[in-house]
Amino acid sequence: MTTENDGCYLLLFPSTSEAIYEDEMRAVSVATPLPDLLPRSFDEIESMRKMRKDAESGKKYVPPRHDLPPPYVNDDECDEFEDATIDNSLENLSSMTPSRKYQLSGPSVEGEVSSVFENGMLYKVIVEDGSWYLYNDTEKYEMHVRFRFGSRSELQPGERVEMFVKSNKELEAFLIVYPHETMKLISGKVNGFKCMAKALPLSDEKRTELFSSINNEALNELSLIAKELDVDGVQALEEGQVLHYCVENEVPYIDCSFPPCDVSLCRQDIDKYKLRSLPWVRPDAFIPPEQLKEVRLFRRTILPSQVTQGDIGDSYLISAMASLAESRDRVRDIFRHPVSAGHGKVERALSAYWVTLNYNGWWCPVLIDDYLPGYREGPEFARCAVDMRRMWVGLLEKAYAKVHHSYSNIASGDPLEPLQDFTGFPITRFDVFWEEAVKGDDEFFKRMVIYDKKDFITMLYTPRNDDSQGQPAHGSINGAATNVENRCNEVGLRLHCGYTVLRVRYFEDFDLRLLQFRNPWGTGEEWTGSWGKKDKRWDKYPSVKARCFPDGMDATEPDNTFWMEWRDVLTTFVGGGVCHVKRNWYDYRIRGDFNDGYPTVCLGINVSDPVDAYIVLSQEDERDGDDLEYAAMLISVSRHGGKHEKMDCTSSLDVEMPGCELKFNFARDVAMRYTFEPEGNPYFVIPRVHDNSISKPYVLGLLLDTYAGNGIRVEFKGIDRECRVFQNMPTFSVKGMTRDVSTEYQIRNPRQPSECVGAELKDERLKEFGVYED
């Protein structure tokens, strides 16, 4: 007989005063604590010791990895971007003959019309009673007009006209005509005249006066929506509210958080780069009415040559967009609707677009309208100049401006960072490697060959105006050029732009190193040096030509590409970098904080099979606040060995080659490539910051070659700040120093990123395959 007392089992002796028992042996079942865990052999004792050690170290059992297909969207079935319904009779809008005489609405009076300038812009109209009028057919110029009339003229000046009598009794009339205006110049008898006119850019004051009235129309519409929704003013509106209202009432969407007005161009007293006031226009302002139904994001094709820079200094961003356009699917993925293709079609018909960007390490679906800074001739900033019916270029730039709070705030930057923001994959800069290559080190070229084989996005930069370079090598840029601008012009390249490296080839027999580049803004014929399109070397070395043009293409074809020898590359460009993109990888993001220099969230990882990964540590972009400065960071990865955890490697300048030294890097993001193998379980991924006084948020990106939960288990751990790992020791113990922590994490889907909270990375997409574990 047993009884349970306070969680313990006690054995009680039976009383003999109440009953008489037979004198025989009986089997008695006695309850004992956890009998199935009692060891029965020496092997079981060793096994239990191992289980205890594994539990102390964090080692966990992980089910085997399965071969599972990645998630995808079948565009052929859903036609998400309505490419199947386009009319191909007009390939590009730029080839369409303009059907209207005037750029704007035309003069407000009728009469005999003549152009003052050969290219239009300013028109003189003589009405029936003989009066002269001037019409300004531009949006961004004020016309300073001066007419000199013969001495026998008898004239009366119009309103705003300044009339003078010259010493020779000639009359001079001066008038400023602003955009859209039709103003009376004179009436009366004219006896000979001479015209002197010039177009000047609008002054800042006049721009603000004219364009604010145009932009106020959209703000007034937002005010009406706020009133309809019983919201206290435009500032209190939320994007979701406005979108729902516009869908319900079938009216065009207006972005309330990034409104079409000057504050979205440039924030006063905040932005250092000042942008002048501009009108904001929808596509119906610059697309002919009969072509409005043909407006799409892409119109089926996506090409680097579609990307055209506007009147803002974001050549770095334009370069990144052109490089991204080498991969059609990556561009399309950015613009997918968070819910469904059907929702996207409905909302785009109402001028609402979604763009998903990686901002400070976290995936953010960005909702924008189709207002763009520009005029009736088209958007003033990024656009597809050859066919403005393709909206993706201008809208991607606008979404990037929105997440960074203004267009002015994206006026300059690093071409590599937008590539990471578009793809989520880490970047490596060539700064140090480039310097060594210029000195004659061949190792960097070998890296370029590897990057090419892995199909990464590699980009090289041209210099700024103030960059200096040594004398170019023989056969490269003309050494007589006195500045970098001339040197770039000679090969058809633009200053401070990035150019995508398409292919890298090494010919051992000739010790020849060649790189092929894309020039989205040229034909490729501009480079006339070694291995240019018309160079006779292509015929002299047929084996080289066959490998560089395997499809039998003509080397002289103007296809926006050109080949250049490595020695010429080093004297034409000044650096570059690579974005380590992968196809069909799985993107996860985990939030954490540095509290007085210590991370609140680390990763505990166990695998059953080898798993390749990129690990990215991101902090807030310093361009988005005066109080934001980059902290020096690194990522360290440890693996279990013996009784302790051993530091295996740390992030370095090259993402593909982690190091063993603690090199903290002042950068927005640091990253490393790593392969987790079962022999090293458990692993700890530990974000580090050099300054122990710093407190700031961070995001850990974990990009895997499989689903989280498929052969890999990722747990969120807190590590005690007394742990020796924070004293930079190569080995340390986590016994009694780790705890489970719950945090926000994110799963990048083809559509809406899934946001979850938990102590372990769980991907519910595995339920579809029956391998999900609760």
Image (cartoon, rainbow, N blue to C red):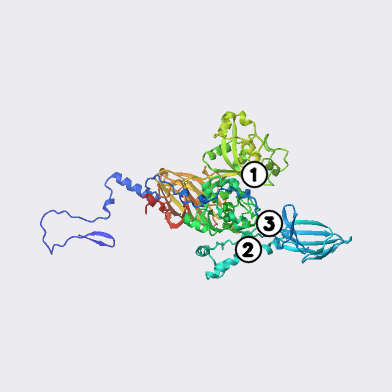
Distance between the alpha carbons at the discs numbered 2 and 1 = 38 Å
**Residue 477 image point, x, y percent:** 68, 38
Furthest residue toward front: 128
Mark 1: amino acid: Thr
Instruction: Out of 282 and 731, give the one closest to the viewer.
Output: 282
Residue 641 to residue 30: above or below: above
Counting other residues with Cα less than 10 Å from the Cα at mark 2, is it few (<14), some (14-19), or many (20 or more)?
some
- Secondary element under disc 1, as helix, strand or loop, is loop
Distance between the alpha carbons at the discs numbered 3 and 2 = 22 Å
Mark 2: amino acid: Asn
Counting other residues with Cα less than 10 Å from the Cα at mark 3, is it few (<14), some (14-19), or many (20 or more)?
some
> Mark 3 near mark 2, Cβ–Cβ under 8 Å?
no
Residue 5 visible in the shown view: yes
**Residue 583 image point, x, y percent:** 48, 45
Task: Tell me if 138 is positioned left or right of 250 in this view.
Answer: right
* Chain-order first, disc 1 or disc 3: 3
Q: Which residue is mark 1?
A: 462
Tell which tag, 1 or 3, sits nearer the viewer.
3
Mark 3: amino acid: Tyr
**Residue 663 image point, x, y percent:** 55, 47
* Chain-order first, disc 2 or disc 1: 2
Residue 726 visible in the shown view: no
Give residue 102's mark: 3
* Chain-order first, disc 3 or disc 2: 3
Distance between the alpha carbons at the discs numbered 1 and 3 = 40 Å
Tell which tag, 3 or 2, sits nearer the viewer.
3
Instruction: Out of 104 and 450, give the one closest to the viewer.
Output: 104
> Mark 1 near mark 3, Cβ–Cβ under 8 Å?
no
Q: Which residue is mark 2?
A: 215
Q: In the rendered image, which quarter contains the C terminus?
A: bottom left
